[in-house]
Image: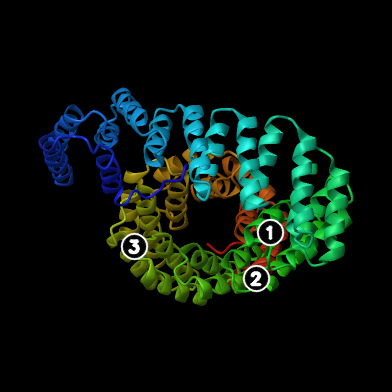
Amino acid sequence: MVKRLPLYFLCMILSFSGLSQKKNKDEKKMLDFENAFMNAQKEQMTGNEERAFDLFKKCTNIDPEQATPFYKLVELSMKRRAWKEAIEYNQQALKIDGGNRWIILQQARIFEANREYDLAANSYERLTELVPGDLSNFENAANLYSMAGKYDAAIKVYDKEERRYGIKETTIRQKVRLYQLLKKQTKAEAEIQKLIATYPNEMKYRGLLAEFYLYTNDKEKAAAVYMLVLEKEPSAGWAHFALSKYWDEKGEHQKAFDALKKAFSDEQVQVKEKVNALRPYHDNSENNTGKQEALELAELLCKTHPNDASAHMAYAMLLYKHKKYSEARGHWQQVLLIEPNNAPAWHQTISCSIELKEYNRAAGDCEKAIETFPEVYDFYLLGCLSYMEQNQFKQAIEKAKAGLESGVEDSETRTRLLASWADAANHLKNYKQSDSLFEKALELDSQSTFLLNNYAYFLSVRKDKLEKAAEMSKITITKEADNPTYLDTYGWILYQQGKYDEALPFLEKAVGLMKENAEVNEHYGDLQYRLGNIQQALIYWNKALEQDSSKKLLLEKKIREQKISD
């Protein structure tokens, strides 16, 4: 971005310098000129630019040897983007007062606006001679030469700036960039060495040299520089970070990990950079070594940056991945202490409690989250689930109704809330309401396998509308032939219809896919009993009993009596 200079009182400066040049004008001509110029100024100040333009033009006719009216005409022409006109008036002004810095600056801006960057750079370079104390002219000239592709010319301007203002990091960086564009790597390196020689105790300039070596693919030299930096500043995290990448590329995993740990211990290294470095460890943490390394880095991250929410988020996500739900929840709570209005953090905190089967706590957090985020409908759904798991079906219904009444328009969310309400109503044996709610939900999404399965299963349990249940359930297994839940539902409906032989392949496949599910094992045991396979029935009833004690009395009775009591 080319820097701009203030033009306060410019018009008056130019006006008086111009008016003082012509002492031999007759008095009337001078008065006419002054009158026209002052009126033009007034019109311009009040926004009547067309009238101002005409009056400035009149000034040039009265006295064509005055530069100021031409300057003002350029100003107005530029405002209406009449570039050709602006250039003509600027040339007239320069013929009269070619050494005027403001007129030259105006010329530079015309060329720049017209994307004639090399010409604009020439003008700014001329200003570096006229006003050598103004750093912006050097920078503008060099930037514009660079934009025009004249890299050598830009470097010369930076050299001139350096001679006047001394060696500076910003100037050196620009020269290095330009030499690299010119593929003059030796000269680029020399510039960085010059910066290091000027500031020998500033380690970041050695880092700049190392980055240069990496750019030229001389990784060994880069590593040597980083090691030298660490000899002088052992805790320099940015150097450890760079060496970690170096060792990793060489296949020295342990050295790379050790260097990364030291980088993670430096609070000067940005959290974002550390989180990005943690990501590959997170993704590759399936084996035990990778898991331990990822957890160690994440712990270091939070220890070094205890008040940074993103650090705790990174650790929490890693802990959750490895089913450390209690610890993960602790870090999500730290996020909430730092950012109380972080909705995803509330969501993850609740999810951890659900995974831990701490449904009462999950429900309480849902209530708090809904107070803060009444428009985040997932919290109503999570609240329904939490209450359902505690058999608090009335509270689950209240939460579903609140969600529906909160203004949710998304059909998928409305469908899920209706389904949750229907589920709770079914548990309260309000079957008419439950069926009605399922029908409403299906009006929103008639092909939802989740809805079709749940509705069909509830009907099958109470042996109601079994033909309808079978039709709905068949859609689900047609869409998802290997879903054990849907296979179990369809097989159970056939069982309830007394179609035992037809039920066998579906329940057999379901139990094969979901061996640890008590309900599926019980269903398969019941079917084996109906098919006359008592010993097989006992095997699966015992499995069901081992997996879920909630139906202990019923299952123990089946096992003891070796039959199903109808």
For marks 1 and 2 on the same chain, the one whose residue lies earlier in the sequence: 1
Q: Secondary structure at mark 1?
A: helix
Numbered tag placed on residue 385 in the rendering: none
Give the residue type at disc 3.
Gly
Residue 367 at least partly seen: yes
Proximity of marks 2 and 3: CB atoms separated by less than 8 Å: no
Q: Quadrant of residue 108?
A: top left
Numbered tag placed on residue 403 in the rendering: 3
Residue that label 2 marks: 305
Give the residue type at disc 1.
Lys
Residue 332 image point, x, y percent: 57, 69
For marks 1 and 3 on the same chain, the one whose residue lies earlier in the sequence: 1
State how far apart marks 1 and 2 are (Cα): 11 Å
Residue that label 1 marks: 274
Residue 61 image point, x, y percent: 18, 27
Q: Residue at x 58, y 71 (%)?
A: 357
In the image, residue 73 above or below residue 240:
above
Mark 2 Cα shell of 10 Å, populated few (<14), some (14-19), many (≥20): many
Give the residue type at disc 2.
His
Q: Secondary structure at mark 2?
A: loop
Mark 1 Cα shell of 10 Å, populated few (<14), some (14-19), many (≥20): some
Q: Quadrant of residue 271?
A: bottom right
Residue 241 at least partly seen: no
User: For the view shown, which residue lies furthest in the front direction?
Assistant: 24
In the image, residue 511 above or below residue 32:
below
